[in-house]
Amino acid sequence: MGGLITTYLASKYPDKITAIVLASPYYDFRDKTGNIYAFNWGKYVVDKAFGEMRKNKNQDSEDPSFKYWYRNQYYSAVQNLSNLKRVVANSDIYEKVTVPVLMFYYYKSETEQDSSADVSKMLEVFDEFGKSNQPNPLNKKIGVQDGAHVLLSEYVKSDKELILKETEEFIKKVKWIKFHPHV
């Protein structure tokens, strides 16, 4: 939800935000059945069909992320994400994002890509940034071929070297332009 909220804030407060870095931002579900919550009866159907919680079958207690991540998921969390999407995820918001945007997304192939957030929607939204005025020339999108949905966690395997290098370069460019606006 962080990418969606960050996008919203960047559209509303461009004078308070210098730039944004997005990692696997959620703009739509990869599995479109998550959109059932857009209907008034969606929660009822999910509760009756599946119960209130999705239990993670992989409960490997040796996994270090178990110390920090809750592996089971309440379906109501998906409903909250759907509600946020309904309010925030639209072209009126995206086109007002004029600050520089660096966006990372996991995509290696049609079968090896982000399993949670829709990559094609990420790329579509990226192309909408700044359309109300002019897209920022510093906007950059980077496909990470070695990764997962959570690209920045120390507990998830991803190309951290690429991510760090690109983030540092982006910040340097943004900082340079901020302090040399007329050059």
Image: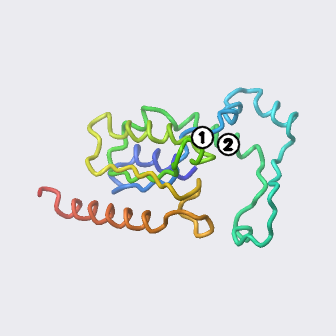
Residue at image x 61%, y 39%? 29
Q: Residue furthest left?
A: 183
Q: Are marks 2 and 1 in contact (CB under 8 Å)?
A: yes
- Residue type for callout 1: Leu
The amino acid type of the residue labelled 2 equals Asn
The x, y position of residue 148, in whole percent, is 59, 55
Vertically, is 50 above or below 177? above
The crowd level at tag 1 (other Cα within 10 Å; few <14, some 14-19, many 20+) is some
Which of the 4 image quadrants contains residue 65?
bottom right
Q: Residue at x 86, y 34 (%)?
A: 49
Image mark count: 2
**Element carrying mark 2:** helix
Residue that carries the numbered disc 1 in the rendered image: 84
Q: What kind of element bears circle 1?
A: helix
Q: Is residue 149 left or right of residue 174?
A: right
> In this picture, is 159 found above or below 52?
below
Give the label on residue 23, or none. Answer: none
Q: Is residue 173 left or right of residue 124?
A: left
Residue 130 x, y percent position in the rendering: 33, 39
- Residue 71 drawn at (x, y percent): 76, 58
Q: Closer to the camera, 9 or 71?
A: 71
Quadrant of the snapshot with the C terminus: bottom left
Colour scheme of this structure image? rainbow
Can you tell which quarter of the image residue 70 is in? bottom right
Residue at image point 71% right, 46% down:
77
Q: In the image, is 88 to the left or to the right of 40?
A: left
The Cα–Cα distance between marks 2 and 1, rounded to whole angstroms, is: 6 Å
Identify residue for label 2.
Answer: 80
User: Picture quarter containing residue 91?
Assistant: top left
Badge 2: residue crowd in 10 Å (few <14, some 14–19, many ≥20): few
Closest to the observer, 69 or 76: 69
